Amino acid sequence: MKLLQRVAATMALALAVAACSDPSAGPPAGSTGSTTGAANAAWPSPTARLDGVTLTIWAAQNSNTMPKAVTDAFTQATGAAVEVVTIPDPYEQGVQTKVATGDKPDLAFWQPTASMLTALNARANLQPLDGAPWVASLSPELRDITGLLDRTRYAALITSPAVEGVYYNKEVFAANGVKEPPKTFDEMVEVARTLKGKGVTPFFEMAADKWATQWWVQVQLADAARDGLWERVNTGKETFEDKTILDAIKKYKALIDEGLFNSDIKTARFEDQGAALLSGKAAMVVQVNSFFGQLQAKADTAELDERIGFFPISPSGNVGTFIPDQSNALVAFRTGDARREAAARQLLAYWMGPGYAGFVADRKTVSLRADVPTPQGVPKALLDVHASLGQAVGSMQALAVANPDLYLNLSDMITGGLTPEQVAAATQKQFAQLAKAAGATGF
């Protein structure tokens, strides 16, 4: 069953990317062949009545509670009904498989990088969001940081883009003589060894849920990414099997083999990860912003500020790896129903317009709008994550032309199925197939 799921997901992704290079795959943005999703489509008033309209939003396990307050307010203001449907993890593969078979929601949480918009065949499947009324109010450095494909806007950024980095338990550090966060990746490993020597579990990983395993490799690649790694991979001049990426995979496995991770790494899940860090069962977790949402569901801001800190990490220093994830953005689908397509744009206009202050206050998260202040009570760790964006470098998802299943291969390595060399080979083979289908040169 696992193999069949992997094959189905890969086929769906390959079909989606292949369709993007096919002129017959769908109408270009703004063409007469589109429904109501053209770039020049009207943006409805955010509070116009929508009695009798039901909108569906697809969400992942770690984003399915995010819409409640703002969609409840939207329902009250417009009369529309909004249903949030959770797509089981791995979320991206589930969505791609459904869309490839013609099953589409009105909106979905989606990673707004060019590679993942390509994987979803944005040109055929998504409504362009050019001319969105809220974009001018975004902080200037965030307006075009993500959500664009071939100069067309397909995704609405709703929260601060994710950064791969290290969440740590301040109390565990202090109790074991760690006075400040590590400054480099190797220094972090030395801290982990010290903690292990004192009976503390240094790192906690969730290999059963798989998707976070790739962060450990990617933070090791931050310096190389700054030096053009992904441009070289994109053009076939370097591969996942070459020294830079393979060494990062090997180091990850070596740290696991050394016993620096939780003993139940093979069966631990996302929920376990948050509980372990908050309780002090583990000292550190390499994760992205959506992880903090789990912590906020378990503790208030005062407790989080007391216990949980964040630091970006790379081989050379405290440099984060920028990776807008599916919890950061929404896309609106071309469904063929003109009224629902317009209503989907209206919900986005409400969410990022009159509903935005309430949304960030409810989520206790950083505001992206220059005219909407970040609410009181946002935990310091989230503020530190947002502050690290200015120095962060792009992840594989942000800079590569395709997004292969590195995390699935790494989870298979952890459970004993693949060697690091096999992880690199399998990832490179899929990347080359997807890059070729997308029309990248060198493949």
Image (tube, helix red, strand yellow):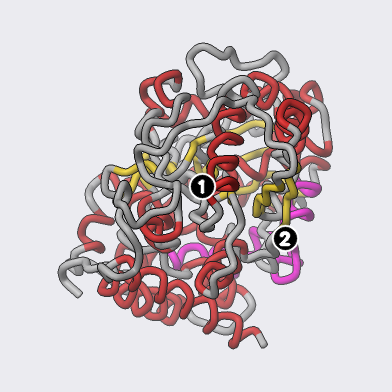
Residue at 29%, 70% (x, y): give it.
24
Q: Which residue is mark 2?
A: 262
Q: Quadrant of the N terminus?
A: bottom right
**In front: label 1 or label 2:** 1
| Residue 14 makes an appearance in the image | yes
**126 or 32: nearer the viewer:** 32
Residue 139 belongs to magenta span: no
Q: Secondary structure at mark 2?
A: loop
Quarter of the figure with the C terminus? bottom left
Estimate the x, y position of residue 425 in percent, counting from the top left: 37, 80
Provide residue 383's location: percent of width, then percent of height: 58, 24
Q: Which residue is mark 1?
A: 331
Task: Name the residue located 43 percent from the left edge and 31 percent from the top edge.
Answer: 132
First in residue order: circle 1 vs circle 2? 2
Q: Secondary structure at mark 1?
A: strand
* Residue at (27% x, 43% y) in the render: 151
**Residue 300 or residue 74, whichever sits in front:** 74
Magenta span: 248-277
Q: Amino acid under label 1?
A: Val
